Amino acid sequence: MNIIISNSSNIPIYEQIKEQIKNKVVSNELETGELLPSIRSLAKDLRISVITTKNAYEELEKEGYVETIPGKGTYVAHKNIKLIREEQLQKVESLMDTAVSIAKISKISKEEIKMMLDILYEEEENGKHIGN
């Protein structure tokens, strides 16, 4: 599993792992029922503490993205697509609310915002824009 850790980030490592795995689940890069690497194996691959990996997996399990079967491993949980979509919509809405507030303070018009959104959306679709 391809996970990239940034040591210079203010985001804790377990949180970086958790968010990247969540994104892979939401995008169906990781499918329902798929076995994740063991805690020990992932920790070794990322050159981090087993405790850090364990914390990420525990958070993912609390949020319903994975399920752990003792002695067998950690698997991608059956997803409640509506719940996951609602979470994503809330995140987008929050970010857009911030963008609109900044735009109003800076006297950036709604049309300029729409144009920026169209450009960013197109770049993302074409794989030219990489963001979290």
Image (cartoon, rainbow, N blue to C red):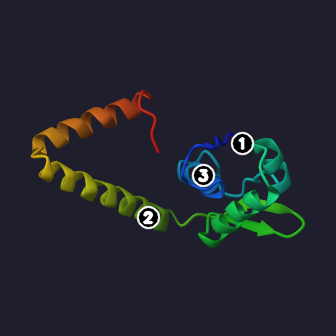
Query: Where 101 sits versus 5, above or below?
Result: below
> Measured from the top left, where is residue 61 in percent x and y?
67, 68
Q: Residue at x 32, y 32 (%)?
A: 122
The residue under label 1 is: 1
In the picture, which quadrant includes the N terminus? top right
Task: Identify residue type, mark 2.
Answer: Glu
Which is nearer the eye, 23 or 35? 23
Mark 3 neighbour density, 10 Å: few (under 14) some (14–19) many (20 or more): some
Badge 2 local density, few (<14 within 10 Å), some, or many (20+)? few
Q: Earlier in the sequence, mark 1 or mark 3?
A: 1
Location of residue 67 in the rendering, given as x and y in whole percent from the top left corner: 72, 67
Mark 3 secondary-structure assignment: helix
Circle 2 sits in a helix, a strand or a loop, which is it?
Answer: helix
Q: Residues within 10 Å of mark 1 (few under 14, many from 20)?
A: few
Amino acid at circle 3: Gln
Residue indicated by mark 2: 87
Distance between the Cα atoms at labels 1 and 3? 14 Å
Tell me the residue that label 3 is attached to. Answer: 16
- For the residue labelled by badge 1, is the local secondary structure a helix, a strand or a loop? loop
Q: Which one is in front in this view, the residue at disc 1 or the one at disc 3? A: 3
110 or 6, which lies in front?
A: 6
Q: Residue shown at 77%/54% (left/top)? A: 35
Q: Looking at the picture, which amino acid does disc 1 mark?
A: Met
Q: Are marks 1 and 2 in contact (CB under 8 Å)?
A: no
Q: Residue 75, relative to residue 118: is it above or below?
A: below
State the residue lying farthest toward the right. Answer: 71
Looking at the image, is mark 1 or mark 2 earlier in the sequence?
1
State how far apart marks 2 and 3 are (Cα). Answer: 18 Å
Give the mark nearer the N terminus: 2 vs 3: 3
As measured in the structure, the alpha-carbon distance from the residue carrying label 1 to the one carrying label 2 is 24 Å
In the figure, is residue 60 to the left or right of 100? right
Q: How many marks?
A: 3
